[in-house]
Image (tube, grey):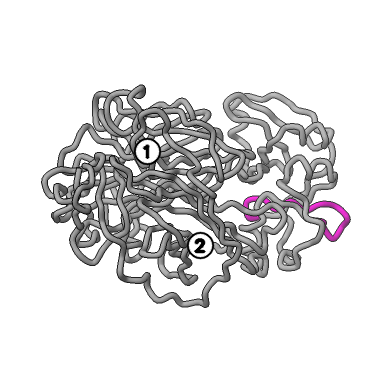
Amino acid sequence: MTAALLSAAALTACTTSEASTGPPAPPPSGTAEQPAGRMAVPPSTTEPPTPELAPLRTANGRQSPGVIAAGGGDAPYNYAPSVMADGGLYRMWWCSQRGIAGPPGDDIMYAEARTLDRFDPATPVFAGSAAGFDAMHVCDPSVIRAGQTYYMYYTGSPGDHAHSNTIGVATSPDGRVWTRAGEPIVRPARNVSNDNVYGAGQPSAVYLDGWFYLMFTDTTGRDAGHNGAGQFVLRAKDPAFARGVEALTPGGFRAVPDTGSRWRSVVDAFSADLMWVDALAAFAIAHETAGGTTITFWDKDFRINPYRPILVEGPWREGPGLVRRADGHAVIPLHTPCETVPIDLVRATREGPAGPTDLKHFGLDLIDVDACATAPRALLTLNGYAMPSPTRTIDLIIAGTIVRVDRRSVAEALATLILNHRIPALDKVPVATHLTPKLPALRAPARGTALLIDNHLWPLSPLTALDRNSSTITDITPTQWDTYDRGVDLVAPPR
């Protein structure tokens, strides 16, 4: 559906580009009708707000030699990817359309790879429900994992009707077989009326400190631009956003009764992606501008821009998907966690006969970030790492604390990597607890397994650490488990 028809009907699959300073422009003469959801908007002619700090240094620009993934078969377009680095694999979900998926409409494809330069053949894993809010179209996936559950936030629509786009969530044990929640979790706010009748969609999710953050487009939101552009942020500890919801306002996050509040937009864009960067203690928002993908940075409370934006150059036709860890955080390079932040993304690069296509990989590195110069940033960046202690044991850095581990073999089981040197900034951080040999362990149904240290439960994984520690497991009831105070989880973050 062409941009000229946006005032008459809402589009679903949410292929949008960067906000503009004027109304959406129609496609060039002779182009084919766009797929549902297409909002062909020219790139922004304005720059992000003037930042407070010096630019970040970048190096090692890179680009895949060709297209890295496609829907295959009769898929006419490929765009809006969600890309996860997960246990040695790259996993990608994106919007396409396959006749075998049914019903007719946008579908979500899935593929895996060992390298970002080429993915295996794609498989449709999620399609319209044939009834309800996502009867015809499902698109714009954003996939994260919290614990053992994968969550996919997506745009759904029953058809091409004004303001028909809403945001749903589905869950999965493996990222392949999905169970939808049934009702949308975010609907158009309908605070304002403009020519863009798209609605609410294009979600991007991050899991941080027990909160699910959700950034999304709502062309009817109070702070949306004249053309509907804008990215709003909600957060909740409930992944379905059914309770305990907070909305971003000009004064920070505030408790709200539901997901309908739209007080403040964080970037003037459509189809953006969100990521938390531990090494910078900042959120990064990827959105398309004239020269490529701009990365705009915000502090944790979205109050200031702590770093100047960077640009990942290259062609684009649709919003980017950042390569993120399973929790939506930036990938941390194994051997240079304090010095380097890789910024990689995938985006459609060509307008095909039916919509954006030709997914390609682009990237660069932020270098000399000095992420371990202070204790707070070192604790964030090195979460899951270990280092030599001053007492010839090992210090495990986990969830903002330091746990002293007597046996190196136990630390090797629990840590992502044991550094060969100590981080000076952490010398004055107190040790939270001491993991000595033969500590008792407790296990309860529907609770898990934990070490018992000073009458606190410290859940851990993998359980091979217990064998290496010569710890004996005692089974207890869930009621008994719940009487204990909790330490932090001795579980390294996903890589």
- Which residue is label 2 attached to? 282
Q: Quadrant of the N terminus?
A: top left
Helix, strand or loop at mark 1: strand
Q: Which residue is tagged 1? A: 95
Q: CA distance from mark 2 to mark 1?
A: 28 Å
Is 206 drawn above or below residue 375 in the view shown? above
Q: Where is residue 129 drawn, in percent x and y? A: 30, 25
Label 2: element kind: strand
- Was residue 394 drawn as part of the magenta stretch in this picture? yes
Residue 382 is situated, as x and y percent measured from the top left of the image, at 67, 56
Residue depicted at x 42% and y 42%: 142
Question: Of residues 425 and 364, which is closer to you in this image?
Answer: 364
Q: Residues within 10 Å of mark 2 (few under 14, many from 20)?
A: many
Regarding residue 258, the answer to whether it shows in the image is: no
Residue 60 lies left or right of residue 69; in this view the side is right
Q: Residue 335: image x %, image y %? A: 72, 55
Position in image of residue 474 (x %, y %): 73, 26
Bounds of the magenta segment: 388-400
Instruction: Give residue 326's quadrant in the image.
Output: top right
The reply to whether dot 2 and dot 1 touch (C-beta < 8 Å) is no
Q: Amino acid at mark 2?
A: Ala
Q: Residue at x 33, y 48 (%)?
A: 351
Q: Nearer the viewer, residue 243 or 6?
A: 6
- Looking at the image, which is closer to me, 265 or 194? 194
The residue that appears at 41% across and 57% down in the rendered structure is 315
State the image quarter where residue 352 is shown. top left
